[in-house]
Structure formats: structure tokens, C-alpha cells
Image (spheres, grey):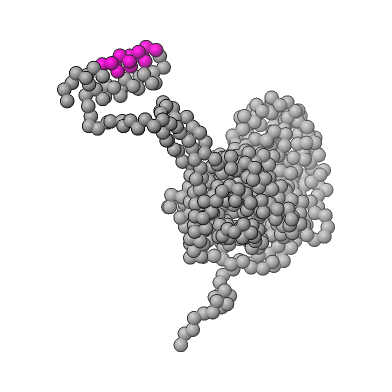
Amino acid sequence: MDHAASPKSLAAARPTIPCSDPATGEPLGEVPVMDRAEVLARLQRARTAQAAWAKTSFAQRRRVVRRVLEHLLAHTDELCRLISRDSGKTLENATVELWPICEMLRWNLAHAEAALKPQKASSGVLMHKSARIEYHPLGVIAAICPWNFPLQNVLAPAIPALMAGNAAMIKVSEWTSWSAPRIQQIFDEALTAEGHSTDLVQLITGYAETGAALVGAGVDKVIFTGSMANGKRVLQTAAETLTPVILELGGKDPMIVCDDADVHQAVHNALIGTLTSAGQLCMAAERIYVFDAVYDEFVAAISRIVGSLRQGPPLGGGVVDVGAMTMPGQVDIVERLVTDAVQRGARALVGGKRGPGGQYFEPTVLVDVDHDMKIMREETFGPVIAIMRVRSEEEAIRLANDSAYGLSSSVFSRDRARAERIARRIIAGSTVINDFAMHYMAHELPFGGVRGSGFGRLNGPEGLRGLSNVKAVITDRLPLHAAVEMYPVRPGNYEQGKAILHILYSTSLAGRARGLVDMGKALWKRATTKK
């Protein structure tokens, strides 16, 4: 006689993701692989929870978000160590991850209600009507996250989704799934404390098949952050259910250092833009174009600093400047790109090879690069500073725009007018002058890219409205209640309609006068024609 399997034995047989510390290889534990059936069941629970959440006031939503912010500040040390353990980044880089999260929370607490309140609009020639734009919840927002910012990549879509009245289902990367239960706890505690269902925010764990199941499950919008190739796959899957998608597909961001730049300032921003999270950030300054007049000074200064940096396990007890890389395969990609560049004539002044133990690639300064090398074409996503000498603004701009990507960019010059002139000509979703990636801290600004960097915008009012049903409403300004009688057609209707077009839209007095004459003729025709 067969016996049904016990819940304990079913749990034991369930597939799991083994998690380990990328800096040391130490096993961290396991998390479950959620299959399509579980994704669909969770979606149904999210829909039920969202139906109630959509009716909440902004004051109620703010109370939940405020609790999330307070939790982050009360548990900063624990969360930074969690991030470091799961991703391999240093504790200092983990705090860099918390900064934009906290600013995003502050901005939403202060401004989300105003961004989503009904907006008055012109009713044009319909003077007897009033018009407005309303922002209604979409329903359930799905997000597919990469592995480079385990905490930020979850909160960045979840918080605006909640503020816009939606539920959120967040598929985390299999490479940083160990932190998912702890991050889920942040939302569970905040929602429970305010009397709301924990099904409003659900972290989903699994491999690519789980992500595909979520994208194709019939959610109301998908936010995908990742590679261009995977973005295309997400788009294809979403198209089957006509699910709208926001794609943030990384970049190959240029940094231009002009001959009048503050070299010290430019060098340190380049270090931030290439070595933060071991270079594993979509806005990394992966192509640095330095004007000939300051090239030698820039290269010497950055090489001296990079040559002194320490690399190793961030939680090993010593001081570490650059941590490990999160995904083993990414080390292979960086090694392949650097090797290709060196074989084609580039020189690694510092680094250029794998680091000992763990998942490390040495902080690398690469010079004599050009656009025939893959490292100036393909996304590196590693701690490599690729520097190219340029001799003019035109050359710098041409090279900056010679890319399949278009996410972010930066320009360094003491001449404000010059910097702004160059910035206007760079094809990208953003340009920062005399700094690196600070647009991400100015949360009023939209974030996103063009070309192969994707489409759609996150952050700020545009990000919130992008997670809403933007609804147009026309209503009565005056209680005229006069019917527009189009049927049955009467004599003179066509002539009258044509006359009104000329009266309202002609750009010359003569055209309007003709319209008035035609109106008179139409009315005369109607009056003198027998019914």
C-alpha cells in the first residue's frame, strides 16, 4: 500500500540552490527553487493582497515604507555584512549600496503622493469640459534582479511599486539568493506591523526557469535588469502575454577627461566608477577617454593608486580595498576581454590577471586600447580601468557615441560651458559633469538608457508613473448636457464640420474668414433644405 509523502519528506526532496561566499568559497546554506506552480500560486496571493492595498491611503503606504527605512538604519551593520557575505564586496561598498536605497526611501516618503495625485490638464477647444490625468495601480509588478546589488536591486523596484498601490514579486539572482530570506523579513515585519498582508512583497528564488515562469505568468508589468541578451529573452517571453516591460540592460559608459579637467578629481572618480563592487555595476566607467595634454599625468596617478590597493576576503579581518567578484563565470569574461586586448597591443600597467584564491580579478589599469578591441565594445563588469588617449572634443564625442549601449556617461572639465556642450552631444540616458553616477542619488531624476541599454525609466515621478495605469479623464465643466446630434445625417453636416475645422485651426485670418463664410453657407443649406 502506497503512503502519501509527508511534508517533511517533500521539503527534503525539493530542489534547492546551494549558496556560498564568493570571497572564500565557504558554503552558506541553501534556498528553495520555486517552480512554475508555486510562482502561479504566489501570484494569486499577491493579487488578493493587492486588491486591498490599492484602497489604502498614501499615509498608510508611507507608514510601511517608513518602517522599512527605520529597519535599514537600525540594522546597518548586519545588513552590510549580509551584502558582503553574499556578493563578495567590501563593507565600504555595501554602505555605498545603502546610500541610494535610503535616499530612494526618503524621496518616496516626501514626494510619491504629489507625483501620483491627479494632474490637471488642458481640455483644448472643449471649453465646456475639464480634463485631468489620474494614476491608478497596475496590479502586480514583477522584477527580475541581477546579482551585483543584493539589497538595492530588491528595494529599488519594490518600494515604488508599493507606493503606487501595487504588489511586487521579486525574482532574485541565484548567485545572491542567500540574503533573500533576510530581505524578505524586512518587508514582512513592516507590513505585519501596519496590518497588511505579507503577500504584497514576495521574493522569488530559483534559476532561469523560475524567472521565465514569473515573466510569463500574467503579471501586470515586468522590470528586468541584466544583460542585453537576457533582456531580449525576457522581452520575447513577455510578448506572449502582452506584458509591458522596463529593460535596464547595463552599459559601456564613457568618461571624458578634458585637458582643463581637475586631474585629481577625475582620477578619484574614475577609481569609484571602475572599482566599486569590483567593477560590477551597470554604470561603471568602462571606457575612459583622456585628452592628450593630461593623459600621462592621469595614467601615472591612477596607476600609482591602483598598484597600492589590497584585495582579498572583505570579512577576513584585514583592510581590503577591492573585494571578490560575485559570479564565477564573470571572472572568466573579464579575463577573456583583458587577454584579447593585450594580444591586440594593449598594455596592463597594473594587474591584468586573476587574483589568488576565491573569485578575484586584480584591479587592472589597461592602456593603449582602441575600439578594435572587445574590451571597448563588450560589457566588462569587472575591475578594469581601460584608458584611451584622445586629442580633441570631436574625437572624444565620436568615440563615446561609438557603442551599442547608452546608459550613463560623465565629463570632466573646469569650463562649465564646455562640459555642458560635450554632455549634450553624448547619446546616453544620463550625463554627470565633474562627478560619477551622482544622478542616481538625485532621485527626482529618471534613470534608464537608450540603444542596447534598454528602455523605460525608473526612479522619480517617471518611475512611479511607469508603474501606474495613466488614465485620462474628461468630465463636465459646465452642466450643459447638450447632445451632439450626428445621426441621422442632416443637410449641411459635412459643410459645417469642414467650416469648424478652418475656424478653429487655420493659422491665418483669411483661412478663418473662409471658415466663417462656409459656416454661414452650411447653416443656410440646413435651413432651406426640406426634411
Which is more toward the observer, 305 or 316?
A: 316
Residue 241 x/y as whole percent: 43, 52
Tell me if I can see residue 447 in this picture.
Answer: no
Image spot of residue 280 (x, y percent): 67, 50
Quarter occupied by the C terminus: top left
> Is residue 200 part of the magenta span, yes or no?
no
Name the residue: 37% across, 15% down: 512
- Is 119 located above or below residue 58 in the figure? above
Q: Is residue 116 left or right of residue 100?
A: left
The part of the image, by quadrant, that contains residue 429 is top right
In this rendering, position of residue 117 left or right of residue 130: right
Q: Residue at x 43, y 31 (%)?
A: 477
Magenta residues, dominant SS class:
helix
Front residue of 258 and 57: 57
User: Residue, x 75% and y 28% (percent of image)?
Assistant: 414
The residue segment tinted magenta is 509-522
